[in-house]
Image (cartoon, grey):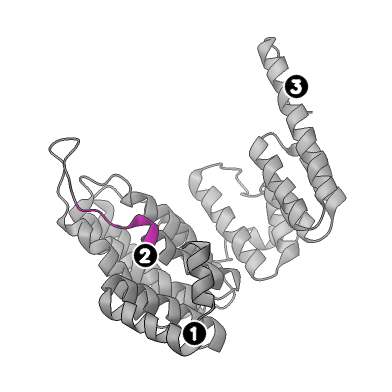
């Protein structure tokens, strides 16, 4: 939307704006579905009422409907219908504010109908898909976070395990057998994995206990850290991120706690990637520490340049 249009809309009175929205919804089905989902999420947040999943189901099914009609291209320039991936991404993203607010139940009210629609669609497009499969890991991560939040009752988690298992079975033969692996593990294990309570309390400083570094463990750790932050369990977050050697996550949380010197000390001792430096610098700026952010960024640039020099000379590259 242009700034000029935004200004004109802001100048309208509520009655005129409402009339325009009604006219737009009557004229454009996609706009109506988008508006219904937006309003459902807004009302659930502001009025603290249970979120109705039906608007999200209707919009997800409408967005994915074109995929059912698509057939493989015979030539590279064949014309074909396609889904609005940005709209689907935005629809999924409406679960994020609920996850951040430790509201897994309402987050699932958004995620479950979207996942169901995607699973129903997948067999029709698995053979030619170019990008739709990328939504599976996104949903997997969000489901895993939701399953771990504090408001999630045991019986709903059991229902979620059954649903995730069913979805995964239905799409396994179409090349997506691990689509919901992290979510399944999170919903099945919860916080009861052996040894995890000792890690969260700071009694153990190694996680996973077997130090098995695989993609599933990594996804579970990410989901648990996100859930711990949403629940306000800061010490548990710091203990787990330390034990799992998630140095960037640990340092960022320290900045959110105002422990800037500790965060910088970890960066200097542990950071090996430019992305980590950038992430921490951004966190420092967000916490009104621009000088510390600038000094860290400068250190990161100097360290990267030193690595390049060492590597070019045939020596062992390492960041001091």
Residue 110, compared with residue 216, is above or below; it is below
Q: Nearer the viewer, residue 245 or 72?
A: 72
Question: What residue appears at the point 68 percent right and 51 percent down from the top-left corner?
Answer: 249
Q: Tell me how many marks there are.
A: 3
Report the span colored magenta: 81-88
The answer to whether residue 236 is seen in the rendering is yes
The residue tagged 2 is: 164
**From mark 2 to mark 3, how far is it between C-alphas?**
48 Å
Position of residue 65 measured from the top left corner of the image (x, y, whole percent) = 22, 63
Q: Is residue 211 left or right of residue 154?
A: right
How crowded pointer 3 is (Cα within 10 Å; few <14, some 14-19, many 20+) is rated as some
Question: What residue appears at the point 47 percent right and 78 percent down from the top-left corner?
Answer: 41
Mark 3 vs mark 1: which is more N-terminal? 1
The residue tagged 1 is: 43
Q: Which mark is residue 306?
A: 3
Position of residue 4 measured from the top left corner of the image (x, y, whole percent) = 51, 65
Position of residue 23 measured from the top left corner of the image (x, y, whole percent) = 32, 81
Question: What residue appears at the point 55 percent right and 70 percent down from the top-left corner?
Answer: 97
Q: Is residue 241 left or right of residue 14?
A: right
Mark 1 vs mark 2: which is more N-terminal? 1
Q: Nearer the viewer, residue 60 or 166?
A: 60
How crowded pointer 1 is (Cα within 10 Å; few <14, some 14-19, many 20+) is rated as some
Is 142 a magenta residue?
no
**From mark 1 to mark 2, how far is it between C-alphas?**
28 Å
């Amino acid at each position: 939307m242009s700034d000029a249009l935004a200004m004109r809309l802001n100048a309208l009175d509520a009655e005129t704006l409402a009339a325009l929205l009604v006219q737009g919804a009557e004229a454009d089905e996609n706009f109506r579905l988008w508006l219904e989902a937006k309003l459902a999420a807004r009302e659930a947040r502001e009025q603290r009422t249970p979120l109705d999943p039906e608007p999200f189901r209707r919009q997800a099914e409408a967005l994915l409907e074109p995929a059912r009609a698509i057939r493989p291209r015979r030539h590279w320039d064949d014309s074909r219908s396609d889904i609005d991936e940005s709209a689907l991404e935005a629809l999924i993203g409406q679960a994020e504010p609920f996850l951040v607010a430790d509201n897994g139940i309402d987050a699932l009210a958004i995620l479950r109908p979207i996942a169901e629609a995607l699973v129903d669609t997948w067999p029709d497009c698995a053979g030619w898909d170019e990008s739709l499969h990328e939504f599976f890991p996104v949903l997997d991560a969000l489901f895993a976070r939701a399953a771990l939040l504090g408001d999630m009752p045991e019986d709903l988690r059991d229902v979620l395990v059954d649903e995730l298992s069913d979805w995964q079975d239905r799409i396994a033969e179409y090349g997506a057998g691990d689509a919901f692996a992290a979510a399944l593990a999170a919903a099945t294990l919860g916080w009861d994995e052996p040894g995890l309570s000792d890690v969260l309390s700071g009694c153990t400083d190694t996680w996973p206990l077997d130090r098995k570094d695989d993609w599933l463990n990594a996804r579970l750790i990410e989901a648990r850290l996100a859930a711990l932050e949403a629940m306000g369990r800061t010490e548990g977050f710091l203990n787990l991120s330390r034990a799992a050697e998630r140095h960037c996550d640990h340092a960022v949380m320290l900045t959110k706690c105002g422990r800037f010197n500790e965060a910088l000390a970890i960066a200097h001792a542990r950071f090996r990637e430019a992305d980590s430096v950038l992430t921490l610098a951004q966190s420092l700026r967000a916490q009104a520490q621009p000088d510390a952010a600038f000094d860290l960024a400068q250190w990161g640039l100097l360290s990267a340049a030193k690595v390049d020099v060492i590597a070019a000379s045939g020596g062992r590259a390492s960041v001091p």
